Amino acid sequence: MSKPKSLFEKVWERHIVEEEGADKPAVLYIDLHLVHEVTSPQAFSELDARGLKVRRPDRTFATLDHSIPTLAPDADGNRPYVTAQAKKQVETLEANAAKNGLRLFGYDAENRGVVHVIGPEMGLTQPGFTVVCGDSHTSTHGAFGCIAFGIGTSEVGHVLATQCLAQRKPKTMRINITGALQPGVTGKDVALTVINTLGFSGGTGFALEYAGPVIEALDMEGRMTVCNLSIEAGARCGMIAPDQKTVEWLRGREYVPQGAAFDEAAAQWLTLKSDDGAVFDKEITIDGSAIEPMATWGTSPDQGAPIVKGVPVAANEDEERALKYMGFTGGEAREVEKVDVVFIGSCTNGRMADLRAAAAIMKGRKVAPGVRALIVPGSEWVRVEAEKEGLHQIFLEAGAEWRLPGCSMCIAMNGDFVLPGQLAVSTSNRNFEGRQGPGSRTVLASPATAAASAIAGHVADPRQFMQLESA
Ligand SMILES: CC(C)[C@H](C(=O)O)[C@@H](O)C(=O)O
Ligand code: SF4
């Protein structure tokens, strides 16, 4: 019998073009290359300078997400770009896509959206694929059993030119999440707990596999959220074995095989799981039943804690510095954290399930006076679906803003930002100093927690609103 293999090893081995050696990395074939406007201009210029063409235009897809405004064009069709640079990035990608014959989910396309939202949504992301993008949160696509990771701009150039990439094989770590989640606890809380357990560099050098009953019970959106944050623990990628949920989620999407060919592909996808007895370089177990709604209190995504436990007292100088930046003393209850802005969206939590969770809390309630709540769908598809369900009405009636898709306030390079000193509860994945605008302070949390905080006007445990409903 052959040696038991992990999911990672199975996918990795299928893509080796040239084996890794002591003095050279492996050469991997890339199934899907996603491109956005921020990290691609120099890569295309390099290609031009060398007189090269895109090797596989049919495996390369581009979208606009980081720099595009989330406000509609004016009556004359002028797009409200925030800077000349944002405009230039968009126009450069439009030109590069046209020149190279790439499909661009462009400004006016009905499928435009954040790169990690549209890949799965279009069925471009498929189990067993290698997926790369010049973007660190490419790990999101691992939720479908892909080896998916972010690459630098020069590597974007290599993949454009060759459809291959030089890579060293990472170590493997399995994270088993046992038990069952309590009501009101979501994939985001799982992700923040995992990062908190590993620490911001605990995943460095590893490909993570998330497994166990909690992961199996999560919907695909929750699994994407978990894989999205892998990079915030320093991991190369994060992945989850495909199952029947994965298959049903992908069925009928534009780029997956159709009809009988889909069932054949699905049968093959379902073989992509770690064999019994597969050996990992590291294995950890987290009790899923003990996970509670989480919120970060510091300036790194691993600096989080269950909301009910309040802000921890600093254990070292780093934590002291983070607390100081955030304006917290340590030891206080989260309720004292007055919220200025709530942002619900991003590639972490900008999907239908996320918006539904936020709407369930906001329905029939009002955003607290003085709080600005911005709800941004992850894609045009999500926007249209949400509007069909009337979710936007719930948000608007609550006093929130409802925007067009994009990275928006997650990265503040498109006109949506948090003012200096303001405190934002955000469903995104990074709370670095100034991430949402110079001097901004970010608390990362789930869509339910963000919605609850918008209503309460302070960082709030969403279960208080859920209990009210059942009382
Ligand atoms: C702009 C891009 C390179 C960046 C990334 O790689 O992740 C961005 O998406 C982010 O989330 O910080
Ligand atoms: S939504 Fe945020 S994290 Fe995701 S790709 Fe855009 S900027 Fe990066």
Image (cartoon, grey):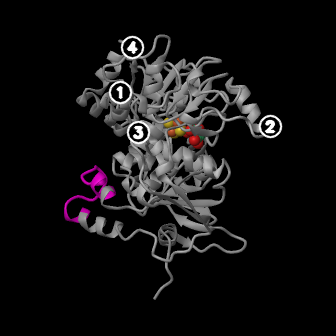
Nearer to us in this view, 187 or 106:
187
Give the Cα separation between the discs numbered 3 and 1.
13 Å
For disc 1, the neighbor class at 10 Å (few under 14, some 14 to 19, many from 20) is: few
Q: Which of marks 3 and 1 is nearer the N terminus?
A: 3
The residue singled out by tag 2 in the image is 317
The residue singled out by tag 4 in the image is 74
Q: Earlier in the sequence, mark 2 or mark 1?
A: 2
Nearer to us in this view, 48 or 293:
293
Give the Cα separation between the discs numbered 3 and 2.
33 Å
User: Image point 62% across, 69% down: which residue?
Assistant: 281
SS at mark 3 in the image: loop
Q: Is mark 4 within 8 Å of ligand 2?
A: no
Q: Which of marks 4 and 2 is nearer the N terminus?
A: 4
Q: Are marks 1 and 4 in contact (CB under 8 Å)?
A: no
Give the Cα separation between the discs numbered 4 and 3.
40 Å
Give the Cα separation between the discs numbered 1 and 4.
42 Å
Does 280 appear above or below 303?
A: below
User: Image point 40% across, 40% down: which residue?
Assistant: 104
Q: Point out the frontmost of discs 3 and 2.
A: 3
Q: Which of marks 1 and 4 is nearer the N terminus?
A: 4
The residue singled out by tag 1 in the image is 468
User: Is 427 in the magenta?
Assistant: no
Q: Which of marks 3 and 2 is nearer the N terminus?
A: 3
Q: Are marks 3 and 2 in contact (CB under 8 Å)?
A: no
Amino acid under disc 3: Gly
Q: Are marks 4 and 2 in contact (CB under 8 Å)?
A: no
Nearer to us in this view, 35 or 246:
246
Across and down, in percent, residue 23 comes to 73, 71
Magenta highlight range: 246-262
For disc 2, the neighbor class at 10 Å (few under 14, some 14 to 19, many from 20) is: few
SS at mark 1 in the image: helix
The residue singled out by tag 3 in the image is 184
